[in-house]
Image: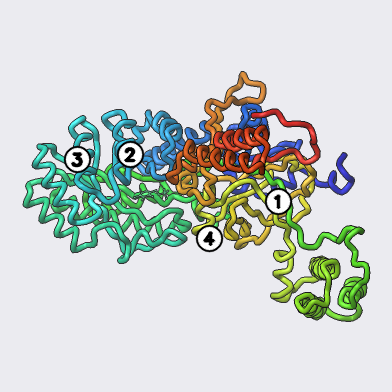
């Protein structure tokens, strides 16, 4: 069925085209049949994402759908701990690594469960940034050696909760973010008779780079400046709590693209640590916060959606810099704490969306809508399309724009009918496309023509909400790798941007990863009437929880996948979580499902009395309304060609 030109294409070419190898970090590949495979443990055992989607469909779950690879999550926890252990061995570092997972990055129970289980042998702990997160951390945490780090703004209840943990023998460290918190900690520990473990968050001068760089520096909203640290020391001494100070903490922001920033921050923070240790505080822990990046575009650069270092290099730099400064200051080295969140969870999940429609500007007019009498403006445009004459591309582009604007003016004045206006628009875009295609051969592109390809790109309409599932793209223009998960043995030929189903012109994706800078469109496959699925990858960090209810779409379906050799496709779905139903989201904004149904019934009854609807029809209408309450919020996409009745899910 493949055409000749398509067979010159190959899955390997797609692998290169979409960069799977570069950003996939050994976890993503394309098989010969053109399907994307995920290797959760980077050991060659792959799972076809399409198989997972098919199985989920069989369970009544359709896209949009989050697919979590639990083994990949486990793999990342082990990997992070192993690289620190390796660095510690190789650098002959005398302390331990005691990482913690910041649960704000993904609080889902199955995610936290998996991370805690995977980190058992490494004494991998938890970081909390709020009361609800601490409530989770306290209950889920196990083992006397694993840390709980308490960050974020704290009220008395937050501190009381942390002190419960101390009472139970947990290594729970309250990090002081504001001077006033220390007064509360001192008072509550006196009241309860529980001795806290305390850390100071230092406001470093080292500035991050990238989108999240404002987490540090003079205007950061967290941490103690140097003078405040001196005040805090006095307070601890006055309260006879000097033995409680155990940790120095910093966090220079998420997704730090440049390793030099990390080196500098570690050096600065270790200086703080050594000074405090020399003043006689027991100390013992240095917490380097988060910031370990993900190479979203696979370019290995210090561009904001990339990182110019590996996880190994990160660990080695943290370990060796701390050692060097401590040695030169004659201070015993601390145990190292890091709070990597993004690096742990981002790779393990992806969002699968279905493209169900295409919006195209330049499709030629069908025969039946040709103008009966062509207006002169239309014949002019036809002439421009056929004859390029001696004019340059830019000049023809300007001429075409002039004609198009003339056509709109004529329409507004009543001189152009609908058919002629349609023909003029269509011809204009065809001329643009022609000019754009000619440009492929020549080298230099004037600015105006450079943007033509973007202007001409199709819009692929995808059944999902950017605001629910990809908030950082909307809010921060963060880029994620996006690619089809099937048909990769076919040549992609359509330039497209993606738009979502919210009623918001911002609900779109129009910037994409590229090795150089950012791309304005993706090259995708033409739609063929069958479901076409795209994967939005590396979305396991932050996106799940930041999403909002714009247009009341709510949570998407979700499946949790485990490797399993005994299964025919090498995996099984352990858990399937159903996305929001209409009743769920409307109750979230204070409507009662029953109340709305009652109101509808009253209106239908009234219409029946007025004979606007027949009684039997009225019953049917109410049934339709009521049954929709239990349906999902996203579009229910029917197969294009099939007039067959679909089975009810
Ligand atoms: C958000 C946050 C983290 C996690 O940062 P990542 O860059 O995702 O690793 C760690 N520590 C603190 C204090 C944070 O606020």
Which of label 3 and label 1 is nearer to you? 3
Residue at image coords 38%, 41%: 103
Give the class, few, some or many, for how many residues have Cα within 10 Å of label 2's Cα (few <14, many ≥20): many
Between 229 and 525, the one nearer to me in the picture: 525
Give the class, few, some or many, for how many residues have Cα within 10 Å of label 1's Cα (few <14, many ≥20): some
Q: Give the position of the C terminus as an image quadrant.
A: top right
Residue bearing the label numbered 3:
160
Which of label 2 and label 3 is nearer to you? 3
Residue 246: give x, y in percent of width and height.
21, 45
Residue bearing the label numbered 2:
98
Which of label 2 and label 1 is nearer to you? 1
Residue at image coords 67%, 49%: 18
Between 319 and 574, the one nearer to me in the picture: 574
Q: Mark 3 to mark 1: distance in Å?
A: 54 Å
Q: Kindly state the secondary structure of the residue where label 1 is placed.
A: helix
The answer to which quarter of the image holds residue 628 is top right
Q: Kindly state the secondary structure of the residue where label 2 is placed.
A: loop
Residue bearing the label numbered 4:
303
Q: Mark 2 to mark 3: distance in Å?
A: 24 Å
- Mark on residue 243? none
């Amino acid at each position: 069925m493949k055409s000749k030109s398509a067979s010159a294409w190959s899955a390997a070419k797609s692998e290169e085209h979409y960069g799977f190898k570069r950003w996939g970090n050994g976890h993503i590949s394309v098989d010969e049949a053109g399907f994307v495979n995920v290797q959760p443990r980077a050991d060659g055992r792959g799972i076809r994402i399409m198989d997972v989607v098919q199985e989920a469909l069989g369970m009544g779950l359709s896209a949009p759908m989050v697919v979590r690879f639990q083994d990949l999550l486990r793999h990342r926890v082990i990997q992070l701990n192993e690289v620190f252990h390796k660095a510690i061995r190789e650098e002959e570092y005398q302390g331990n690594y005691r990482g913690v997972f910041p649960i704000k990055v993904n609080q889902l129970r199955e995610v936290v469960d998996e991370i805690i289980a995977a980190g058992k042998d490494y004494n991998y702990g938890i970081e909390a940034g709020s009361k609800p997160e601490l409530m989770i951390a306290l209950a889920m945490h196990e083992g006397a050696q694993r840390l709980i780090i308490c960050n974020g703004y704290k009220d008395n209840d937050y501190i009381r909760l942390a002190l419960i943990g101390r009472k139970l023998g947990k290594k729970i460290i309250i990090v002081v973010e504001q001077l006033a918190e220390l007064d509360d900690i001192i008072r509550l520990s006196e009241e309860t008779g529980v001795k806290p473990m305390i850390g100071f968050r230092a406001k470093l001068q080292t500035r991050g780079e990238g989108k999240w760089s404002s987490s540090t520096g003079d205007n950061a909203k967290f941490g103690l400046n140097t003078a405040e640290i001196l005040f805090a020391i006095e307070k601890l001494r006055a309260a006879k709590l000097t033995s409680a100070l155990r940790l120095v903490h910093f966090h220079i922001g998420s997704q730090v693209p440049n390793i030099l920033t990390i080196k500098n921050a570690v050096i600065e923070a270790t200086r703080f640590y050594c000074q405090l240790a020399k003043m006689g505080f027991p100390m013992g822990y240095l917490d380097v916060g988060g910031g370990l990046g993900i190479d979203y575009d696979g370019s290995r650069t210090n561009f904001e959606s990339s990182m110019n270092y590996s996880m190994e290099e990160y660990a080695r730099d943290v370990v060796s810099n701390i050692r060097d400064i401590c040695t030169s200051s004659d201070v015993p080295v601390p145990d190292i704490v890091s709070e990597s969140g993004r690096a742990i969870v981002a790779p393990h999940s992806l969002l699968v969306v279905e493209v169900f429609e295409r919006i195209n500007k330049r499709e030629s007019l069908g025969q039946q809508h040709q103008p009966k009498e062509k207006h002169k403006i239309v014949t002019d445009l036809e002439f421009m399309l056929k004859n390029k004459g001696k004019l340059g591309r830019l000049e023809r582009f300007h001429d075409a724009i002039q004609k198009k604007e003339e056509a709109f003016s004529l329409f507004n004045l009543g001189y152009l009918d609908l058919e002629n206006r349609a023909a003029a628009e269509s011809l204009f875009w065809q001329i643009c496309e022609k000019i754009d295609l000619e440009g492929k051969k020549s080298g230099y592109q004037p600015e105006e023509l450079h943007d033509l390809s973007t202007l001409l790109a199709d819009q692929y309409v995808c059944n999902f909400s950017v605001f629910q599932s990809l908030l950082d793209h909307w809010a921060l223009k963060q880029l994620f790798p996006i690619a089809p998960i099937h048909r990769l043995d076919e040549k992609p030929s359509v330039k497209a941007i993606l738009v979502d189903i919210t009623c918001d012109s911002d609900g779109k994706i129009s910037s994409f990863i590229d090795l150089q800078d950012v791309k304005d469109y993706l090259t995708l496959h033409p739609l063929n009437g069958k479901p076409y699925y795209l994967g939005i990858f590396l979305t396991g960090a932050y996106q799940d929880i930041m999403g909002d209810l714009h247009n009341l779409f709510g949570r998407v379906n979700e499946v949790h996948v485990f490797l399993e050799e005994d299964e025919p496709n090498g995996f099984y779905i352990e858990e399937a979580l159903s996305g929001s139903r209409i009743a769920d989201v409307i109750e979230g904004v204070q409507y009662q499902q029953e109340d709305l149904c009652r109101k509808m019934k009253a209106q239908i009854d009234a219409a029946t009395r007025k004979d606007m609807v027949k009684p039997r029809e009225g019953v049917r209408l109410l049934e339709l309304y009521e049954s929709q309450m239990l349906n999902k919020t996203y579009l229910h996409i029917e197969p294009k060609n099939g007039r067959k009745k679909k089975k009810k899910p």
